[in-house]
Amino acid sequence: MAVDVNSNKYTFIFATVMVVVVATLLALASESLKPMQNENVANEKRQNILSSIGISVDASEAKAAYEKYLVEAVVLDANGAVKETEVNAFDIDVLKDYKAGLSNIYKANAGDMEAMKAALTSWGEGGVNYPLFVLNKDGQDVYVVPVVGTGLWGPIWGYVTVASDGKTVVGAVFDHKSETPGLGAEIKEASFQKPFEGKTIFDENGDFTGIKVIKGGAKGDPHGVDAISGGTITSNGVTEMLVRTLKIYEPYFLGLQTPAEPEVEEVVADSLTMAMDSLNVEVVDTTVVD
Amino acid sequence: MSEVAVEKVKKPSEPLFSKKNKALISNPLDDDNPITVQVLGICSALAITVQVKQAFVMTLSVMFVAAAGNVIVSLMRNMIPNRIRIIVQLVIVAALVILVDQVLKAFVYDISKALSVFVGLIITNCIIMGRLEAFALGNKPWPAFLDGIGNGLGYGVILILVSVFREILGSGKIWGFPLFGHKVGALLSDGTLATEASGLYALGYVDNGLMILPPMALITVGAIIWVQRARNTKLIEA
């Protein structure tokens, strides 16, 4: 009966049994809880998308609300053109694509810092999918862009919503994996996100600017918001993420701004002169009658 | 051997909360505090004491893992081979933490998100391994359970104390609630941003940014140790 717990044989058997038991337990727990976890993650994504257009719902209602506001979800290619694809825009894991893109750049340019830096600035030619969610807010189409980037300790991500004019930001939400509480983690607080509203991603000349997080205060900059004191690296990460990602969507937003413009102007001018003419005539007429 | 065994069987008649067992909870709060006396778990005390809320959540998590880990190791204490006991303890703690994390993710996603960084930190917390090694391996499950709760509490008391100082002086808030009025750009309760400072901030008060950074946590812990040793002469080393 007496077992020598310190014999080699017992030690090996104990270690083996323990590893098998623990591994089975964890695998079982992980597999059986997976569907619920995935559903939670999907609902959180829906909540985030809705929250970037200013609608907050409970996780339990997120699915219904998302379907109610969604107009369409499209997939863009790296040049910002709408892509014909089988892929469901909602299922695209932008974080995974971002990580894969980064590691490709590192691998392709290993040992050559200059080439790596150049590749990192001209980002996005990977031919990956860029999802875009078109939602309806107060009768207007708004465009929700998922963004991902790198903070201080891990990935940061969020959603930026652009109005139907293709340049004004309606709202933005951000989240992070492991930024420092009280410092970088503040990007998920409303006090950081709220100032994004009303900022523009193009300047008056129609050139792309993106939105920058500015250390020391944005001081009314139409393309910038205040950085977080003590969270410089996270703030810089947000800037890099926004400029890089929105740059990829630039052609799409330009397309929203331009197509109608020349024609609309002509039509407006014509109808305006016509209206003026008829008005004049009427005015003249009435005066005459009077 | 057999006489000793008989004697041991008689012993458990001691009440659940005997003086000795109560000491298991009260000692770590003062005389044997894991942070200020044993100087364990300092790393996480620096990392997550910027806000009271996080410190509170971390306290609950560490209490749970310390108590559950202690009970499991105590139940297995006669089966664990001596030479691999540290690895066995590590596997038990890690498995426990992963399991908790998975369950939280599936059922209370919000809490799991709030815990995100800290779950990993629990595994590396020296207090848990320290108590498994020093106490659970040689004691019965019930005292081991109390010891885990006690040490979790002792750790949490210091954590929350430090975070109260850091949140008030560093951000002017407690549990996220502003104490001294609003700064320019702060989010008001009606969802708009404050355009001008109110309360103390209007008078020129400025938060101490250094309190947010880790070094101030160390200095705060140091101050707590100082006060504690001044009051509790038992702790003064000759």
Image: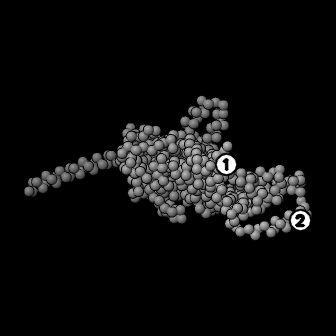
Looking at the image, which is closer to me, A170 or B89? B89
Residue shown at 58% from the left, 56% from the top = B57
Quarter of the figure with residue B19: bottom right
**Is residue A115 among the parts visible in the rendering?**
yes
Whole-percent x, y for residue A215 in the image = 46, 38
Residue that mark 2 sits on: B2
Whole-percent x, y for residue A65 in the image = 49, 63
Task: Name the disc covering residue A256, or none.
Answer: none
Residue shown at 62% from the left, 49% from the top = B233
| Amino acid type of the residue tagged 1 in the rendering | Gln
Q: Secondary structure at mark 1?
A: loop
Quarter of the figure with residue B139: bottom right
Give the side of residue B72 with respect to residue B110, left or right.
Answer: right
The correct choice, above or below, for B207 with respect to A44 in the image is: above
How far apart are labels 1 and 2 at the CA level?
38 Å
Give the side of residue B6 with respect to residue A249, left or right.
Answer: right
| Amino acid type of the residue tagged 2 in the rendering | Ser
Residue shown at 58% from the left, 35% from the top = A119
Q: Quarter holding the C terminus of chain B?
A: top right
Whole-percent x, y for residue A125 in the image = 57, 40
Residue shown at 62% from the left, 31% from the top = A113
